[in-house]
Amino acid sequence: MRPDRVGLLCADRAAGSVLGGRDGEQGTFVEGWNHTKNNIEKVAAAHSAFALILDDTRLFDRSNRKGFADFCEAIMRLAEGRIKGRYEDVGDPIRFQTSVLSTSNDSLDQMARDLGVDIDDALRGRLIDVPLMTGVLGAFEDLHGYGHHGAFTAELRRLARENYGVPFSFFLEKPVPHIARNKLRLLAWLNARRANYETAAHSRIHSAWRDVVRFHGRFATIFAAGCLAIQFGILPWQPEALLAALLVCEQAHFDAVAESSSPTTKPTSSQD
């Protein structure tokens, strides 16, 4: 669970470049975890109806139990989608809907174990750890013909710097008008894809002591969104390959948590 930092940093830069970027930051669309629990929700609100990519959980002061508790509260606040109300506020609390992608050298379970504290699936289900595959170079499963992961990283950076925002611009120009005209049909189509993933996940992914339903639902949403991007030609993939990749990622999460949790400290699942 300790990935190569250069590869992982490049991976989140590449993901962010799909959405947009800033010229002064080499086309990146990534924020850091260098925030307090109160400020991180404001950052999420600024990205509402979009995506928030947060780099390196070590930037958040979580080196002791108090800091880790604040980090856990920040995760819950991000998932809640509502800025915490304060005494001086006027009007209703600010709400947001923001998808979050985060990078970390340590999993939530590793952080908790190092500090001697317990976490449960209420937290895991809001920031789902997916470990890197074993036996790969850096953060990449396939170097696509490049001699080493440093060369592939440099190429990803170049592509992100020169082409940031292009996929999302295409999405705004072409699919969005179509979606607006066919909203009910689109919702039915997306729900069918979610159901396809959940059916596959229920048949392949099991846990003796954890509630898997919430996790299946999270990955099902990613699958449906990916299928939509494939349908409109934004992603050059096949739905079957996307399904297989997501099932591997979800299984890897359950395997990693099972490996890091001893039978006497396995947390109970939560339905909140």
Image (cartoon, grey):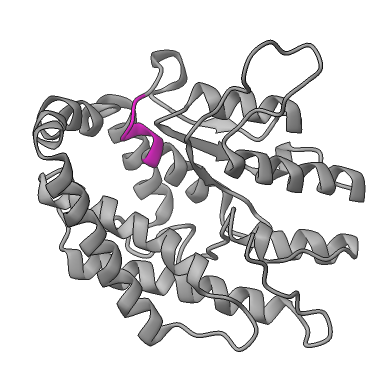
Residue in view at x 30 percent, y 27 percent: 164
Q: Is residue 169 magenta?
A: no
Residue situated in front as seen by the camera: 238 or 180 = 180
Residue in view at x 67 percent, y 46 percent: 76
Quarter-wise, where is residue 257 in the image?
A: bottom right
Q: Is residue 8 above or below residue 114?
A: above
Q: Which image quarter is the N terminus in?
A: bottom right
Relative image position of residue 118 (x, y in whole percent): 83, 66
Q: Is residue 18 magenta?
A: yes
Relative image position of residue 4 (x, y in whole percent): 56, 55
Residue in view at x 89 percent, y 60 percent: 115
Relative image position of residue 163 (x, y in whole percent): 25, 28
Quarter-wise, where is residue 208 in the image?
A: bottom right
Relative image position of residue 41 (x, y in whole percent): 64, 29
Q: Which image quarter is the C terminus in?
A: bottom right
* Number of numbered tags placed on the structure image: 0
Q: Is residue 3 above or below residue 164?
A: below
Q: Is residue 208 visible?
A: yes
Quarter-wise, where is residue 266 in the image?
A: bottom right
103 sits left or right of 177 in the view: right
239 sits left or right of 197 in the view: left
Residue in view at x 36 percent, y 86 percent: 203
Q: Is residue 20 above or below residue 7?
A: above
Residue situated in front as seen by the camera: 9 or 167 = 167
Q: Is residue 107 visible?
A: no
Which stretch is magenta? 15-20
198 sits left or right of 71 in the view: left
Q: Is residue 186 above or below residue 260?
A: above
